[in-house]
Image (cartoon, grey):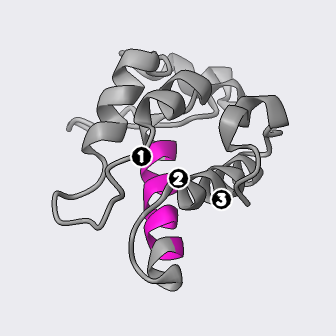
Amino acid sequence: MEEYEGIAILTTNARSNMDEAFERRLRFIIEFQLPDSNYRYLIWQKIFPKNAPCNPDLDFEFLAQNFEITGANIRNIALSAAFLAADDGGVIEMVHLIRAIRREYQKMGQILRDKDLGDYLGLR
C-alpha cells in the first residue's frame, strides 16, 4: 500500500474488524452514519423505477420510520420485493416489502420484532 501512487477508495460495513496497523496506513477515514428517517423516506420514494408496477398505496413513510437500515438494505429489499411480486403476478404490494424486509433482517443477522411491523404484522 505504501508504494501505490494512485487513489484507492476502500469501503466496509465492519470497521471494527479492521486491523489497527492497516488503518494507520489510511490517510483519510470517512464514516457515514445510517440515513435518518427523512433520508430513508426519500430513498424509498426513488428506489423503484418509474415503470415498476407498484401499488400506489405503498407505505414508504411507515417503512422509513420503522426500519433503521442503509440505502443498500433498502435496495436489496426493493429488488427482493420486485421478484416476490413478479412471482405473485406483478404488482409490488406491502406484503412483498414486508416479506423482503424479513429476509433482509435474516441476512443481516438481526431480529425483526413483531412490534416493528405495526399494522402490517399479519402480512406474511
Q: Which of the labelled discs sits on residue 119, or is there none? A: none
- Look at label 2 and name its amino acid: Met
Residue drawn at x 83%, y 37% is 114
Classify the position of the C terminus by image quarter: bottom right
Q: Nearer the viewer, residue 50 or 107?
A: 50
Q: Which residues are magenta?
A: 73-84
> Label 2 belongs to which residue?
94
Tag 2 near tag 1, CB within 8 Å: yes
Q: Secondary structure at mark 2?
A: helix
Q: Residues within 10 Å of mark 1 (few under 14, many from 20)?
A: some
Q: Is residue 13 magenta?
A: no
CA gap, disc 2 and disc 3 = 9 Å
Residue 89 image point, x, y percent: 45, 83
Q: Residues within 10 Å of mark 2 (few under 14, many from 20)?
A: many
Q: Nearer the viewer, mark 3 or mark 1?
A: 1
Question: Could you tell me which residue is drawn at 52 percent across and 34 percent down?
Answer: 63
Lower sequence index among marks 3 and 1: 1
- Report helix, strand or loop for mark 1: loop
Residue 76 visible at all: yes
Asked whether the residues under the numbered discs 2 and 3 touch, taking CB atoms below 8 Å apart as contact, a structural biologist would say no
Residue at the farthest left position: 50
Which of the two residues, 90 or 44, is positioned nearer the viewer here? 90
Name the disc covering residue 99, or none. 3
Q: Check the picture and name the quadrant holding the N terminus.
A: top left
> What residue would you read off at disc 1?
58
Examine the rendered structure and indicate whether residue 114 appears above or below residue 52. above
Residue type marked 3: Arg
The quadrant where residue 14 appears = top right
Q: CA distance from mark 2 to mark 1?
A: 6 Å
